[in-house]
Structure formats: structure tokens, C-alpha cells
Amino acid sequence: MTISEERRTMIVSRGFGERRREPDPSLPPGQRTTEDFPVMSAGPTPVVSPADWRFSIATERGTAEWGWDDLMAQPIDDVTTDIHCVTRWSKLGTRWRGVSLDHVLAAAGGTEQVSAMIDCYGDYTTNVPIADLVGGKAWLAFEFEGEPLEPEHGFPVRLIVPHLYFWKSAKWVRGLRTQAVDEPGFWEVNGYHQYGDPWREQRYW
Amino acid sequence: MSGDWLPATVIDADWPIPTGRSLWVRVDGWPGNLAGQHVDVRLTAEDGYRAERSYSISTHGPSPVLEFAVDELPDGEVSPYLVHDIEVGDRFEVRGPVGRYFVWEPAQTGPVQLIAGGSGIVPLMAMARARRDSGSDAPFKLLYSVRGEPYAYFAEELEQLRGETFGIDWVYTKRAPEGWHRPPGRIDRELLEQLVIPAAEQPSVYICGPTPFVEAAANLLVDLGHDPARIRTERFGG
């Protein structure tokens, strides 16, 4: 369809657009910026103390388990990144501290498998391709804007995979299992996209 | 499932509360929706500028006529237009339905506790209507927290649903009606213990509202012994 054809077939809302925002090139399509930090969770907030926190890393080579001290013994990255929620808010330039998933997977001897299922306290799950977890693209984060995570934002540890819609950045993580096939997680079976690239607007099935 | 953008025409609109509007739209080609699902809304200005938002739907089933309610956000871009400017006959686009978790289906026969804060009533209203329209006799209770009487969406329709197996409890946070049996205030442990279907009866619980309301209600219910796996939440403010 050419632009003029699209214009002709466009459904216009009379009088809309007076309060429009300046377009921001760092925003993926259909997103808007927010200064708040909205909470999206399917259930109650799990209560997990750092002392009780465990993270298991299960691959075809076996299972490793980390506690809080093991996480803190890893190299820690300072990460500044934009985040994009499928419910259409984006938050620009957020600051996190965490351990790169490169170290997490290396600790388990690496993997040849294609995908990981992320498991959480509260039984949330989400699937992420291994290629999207390695190469400095994903972290086990424990600080947001210089403070420990808020309970409703994943305390003590959450995943961040900021180049995908934020439901992939699972809160209250307790492990990952590599998988030979990219099986879907919780929201992925409940209507949301298997991969979730905000720049391609992969919101839903 | 969510498919293409579909044309929606406003067929009715009113202001059930001073700060929000109810919009009825006809959507040609709407595939129907479950009680509790969302819809994406896309507005296009005359010069092609576009904005998109998500709204919960208060209707359910195969009908191409949908209702949703919009609260005006003080600094909003889309909500002031939908609350004040759009008129019957105006058009925009919708896509959906979205979400398959925060839903109630008539095949569920167990007890259901609905807990709404403000316009969080919208998806729960769809569930209440689905129960009525399906003839379900699943025991329902609704706890609906509002600032004051004028701020309750669907007040009249809800009162008509009240019955032996559909309990309704109003909670007023700022101003209670004259002679109301409880002083205004936010939900707390004692109130939930008194008004919510007890954990022992294993109700499915649906909570929707602003984040602090949902956090408080969900945490208190877990504290009161409800299984977290039976508590479904939807928080807005996003």
C-alpha cells in the first residue's frame, strides 16, 4: 500500500491529537514514556530474603546452584538501558546492577541448547533464546537506581533482558533450565508473543 | 489471536462518574472476548499522528458491541480525548482481545471473590455479567473500594446483581454515605478477614486496581492463608 492509499483508508478520530507528545526516536512503535515504574504481575508478590534465595542453573551438562553470596562473588556490571513493557510504557535510561548471564551460563559449563526457561518464586515462567541471554544482553539484576529492588519489582533478584518486552525480564527468579526446543512460558501460553521484540511490535500471538 | 486493527464506532457514551467515561463501541469483525480481557485502542489524528493504549473490557462473549471505561489521567494524552472530546459516531481502531490469564469462564464452578479498586472494576464487571448471562450459580462476592459513592462505576447494575449467591461489599476510602456503618478508610487485614470468602473455601480471587491497592489486597490475603496460586492480579498505572 502506498502512503497516499494508506491515508485514504485511514480511520481518523475527529479532533484527536491536540495533546500529542513529541516523537522520541528511542521509543519503539506504539510505546510512550513514563517516569513512574508501573508494576505488572499476574499474582501476589512473593516474599524471598537474600539469605533464602537460590538460583539453579540446569543445562544438559548438569545442575549448578547459586546462593546470594555466589551471585555477589561474580563480576558485577553497571547497566544503563531503556525498558519497554508490552502494556505500552517505556522507561528510558534506567540504571541497574547485576551479573551478566554470560557468567551464569559459564558457571554451568555453557550450553549447546537453543533456549532457556526462566523459573521464578511464585511459579511465573518465561522462555528466552540462549542467543538473547549471552553476549552482554541479559543480567541477573539486584539493584535498580542504586537501591535494592522493591519487593513488587522482583526483590531480591530479577532477570533483565532489556532488548525484549519486559515480561521476559522475570521477577523473583529462582533458576533457569536450558531447553532443546523454545517451549513457551507463562505469558507466552496466555496470549503474548513467543519472542517479544519491541521494535517489531511482537506483542501478541 | 489479536489479529488486525478493526474499525470501531462509538455508539453510546456517558459519564457514570465525575472523572471517567463509559464508551460503547461497535467493532466490525470483533472475534468476541472472554470476561476479563483487554483491547488495544489506536487513535489517528487527521495528519496521521497515532497513539495506542490498552483498556480492559467490561463486556464479554461474541457480541461486536464492547464497553470500556476510561479514567481521565491528569497529564494524559489519550484519556482526556476519550473522556471529554470523542462523541457518538466518531471512530477509532481496536485490536484484540488480549490476555488469557485474568479471565473467568462460566465453566468455572468454584467460589469467586472479586476485589476492585476504582476503575479496576471494569474487567471484574465483565466477569459479573458473564456469570449473570450464563446462568452460572458459582458463588460470587465483590468487594468494591471507591473514594465515595459518586465514584462507583456500574453502581446500579451491580446492585441489581446482588442476591443470595452474589454478595457485594462497598468500601469507601474518603467519604462514606450518610449513616454508613463503617468510617471511610482503606482496606486492611480486619476488613478483608470480615468481607472476603475465607481461605478455607478456596475461592478464586481476582484483584484489579491501582498498584498500591492490589499489592495491599494480595499481600493481606496471602497473609490470611489464601493460596497465592489462586490469586490473580491486574495492576494499572502503566
Image (tube, coloured by chain):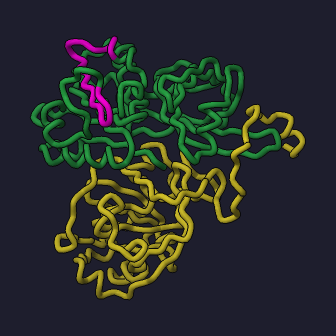
Chain colours: A yellow, B green
Question: Which quadrant does the N terminus of chain A fall into?
Answer: top right
In this rendering, position of residue B137 left or right of residue B6: left
Which residue range is magenta in the image? B159-176
The C terminus of chain A sits in image quarter:
top right
Q: Quadrant of residue B27?
A: top right
Q: In this view of the protein, which residue sits in the foreground, A56 or B87?
A: B87
Residue B223 shown left or right of residue A82 in the figure: left
Query: On screen, B219 above or below B45?
Result: below
Q: Does B99 lie within the magenta span?
A: no
Q: Is residue B5 visible?
A: yes
Residue depicted at x 81% and y 38%: B46
Residue B226 x, y percent position in the rendering: 16, 42
In the image, residue B168 lies in the stretch drawn in magenta: yes
Rendered location of residue A99, percent (x, y): 39, 80
Rendering coords of residue B4 (x, y %) = 65, 37
> Residue B136, position in %: x, y?
29, 16
Q: Between residues B105 and B207, which one lies in front from this camera angle?
A: B207
**In the image, what residue occupies the spot 21% across and 32% down?**
B183
Closest to the observer: A124 or A49? A49
- Residue B1 seen from this side: no
Q: Residue at x 48, y 78 (%)?
A: A79
